[in-house]
Image (cartoon, rainbow, N blue to C red):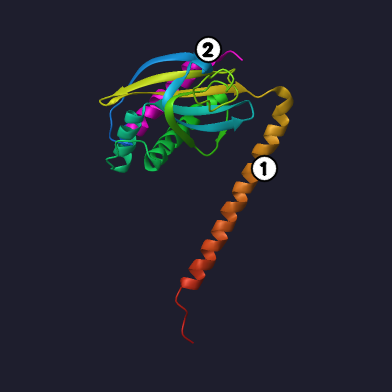
Amino acid sequence: MDINALEEGITKAIKDTTDEVFTSMLMLEVKAEDSFVEDEKSVSTDLISSLHFFGAKYMGKIAVFCSGAVACHIANAMLGGEAEEVDEEIKDGMGEIVNMIAGGAKVKLLEILGNIHLLTPWVIAGRHLTLSSASEGGGELAIDAQAQFSWVMTKFTFENGSFLVGVQPNSVPEDQQAPVQAEIQALKDENQKLKEENEQMKSQLEAKAAPKKKK
C-alpha cells in the first residue's frame, strides 16, 4: 500500500471535518497547518485520543494527539468546565472529540477507504507517550505493540495551542478480506436486530402508557 497516494484525500477529509466539529460544537476557530506522513515510531505526545476502524479494504486508527494543557482547553470548551489538569472528565471529552471527528470523516473518506466501521474511542494520558513498541520505547510508555505503520498527520492551531489529527490506514490482506466482510455483515445484522428490539420495546412501552378506554 502506498500511503502517499491516500494522503491528499485523507488530509482534505480531516481538515474539513475537524473544522466543522470545532466550529459548530466547540465554538472554536481552528486553522489547518502542515500535513505530512509520520512514521509511527516518531510520535510522542502527552495525550492520545484514538479509535480503531475497519472495513473490507482498509483498517487502522484515527486519533487526536495533544498536550495536557491543550486537551483541557478543548474539553473545557465542549463541556463548559474549568479543569486545569487532565482528569477523567477531560479524557471523556477528548474521547467524544475523536468520535465526532471520525464520525464526520467516515462519510468523506468513503471514496478513499471504502465503507468503514468505527469502534469505541479510548484515551490515554501521561508524559511523552509514544506509539513505539515496548522494546524500542526505553523508559517511555508504549501504547501499541505494532510500530511498523505510518500516519497521515494534519496539524491544527487555535488561540490556546496546537494539536494533531492523524489517520493510520492499513490494507486488509487479501486472504483476510472474506473473513472481514463476514464480520462486517455480522455486525450489521446484530445492529439491525438491536434496532428491531428497540422499536418493539418502544411500542410496548407506548401501549402501556396509553390511556385505556372506558367501557
Looking at the picture, how far across and down is residue 145, in whole percent? 59, 25
Q: Earlier in the sequence, mark 1 or mark 2?
A: 2
Q: Is residue 178 magenta?
A: no
Q: Residue at coordinates 34% horizontally, 37% vertically from top-left?
A: 75
Within-10-Å neighbours for mark 1: few <14, some 14–19, many 20+: few
- Residue closest to the far left: 159
As shown in the figure, which amino acid type bears the numbered disc 2?
Asn
Residue 177, by quadrant, is: top right
Q: Is residue 9 magenta?
A: yes
Q: Residue at coordinates 29% horizontally, 42% vertically from top-left?
A: 81
As shown in the figure, which amino acid type bears the numbered disc 1?
Ala
Q: Residue at coordinates 25% horizontally, 25% vertically from top-left?
A: 159
* The magenta segment: 1-22
Residue nearest the viewer, comparing 24 with 128? 128
Residue 14 as seen in the image, left or right of residue 40? left
Residue nearest the viewer, comparing 135 with 203? 135
Looking at the picture, how far across and down is residue 94, in whole percent? 40, 36
Where residue 186 is drawn, which disc sits there?
1
Q: Is residue 89 above or below residue 144?
A: below
**Which secondary structure dominates the residues rendered in magenta?**
helix
Which type of secondary structure does the marked residue at label 2 adopt? helix
Which type of secondary structure does the marked residue at label 1 adopt? helix
Q: Which residue is mark 2?
A: 4
Looking at the picture, how far across and down is residue 130, in whole percent? 49, 22
In space, the residues marked 1 and 2 are separated at their CA atoms by 32 Å
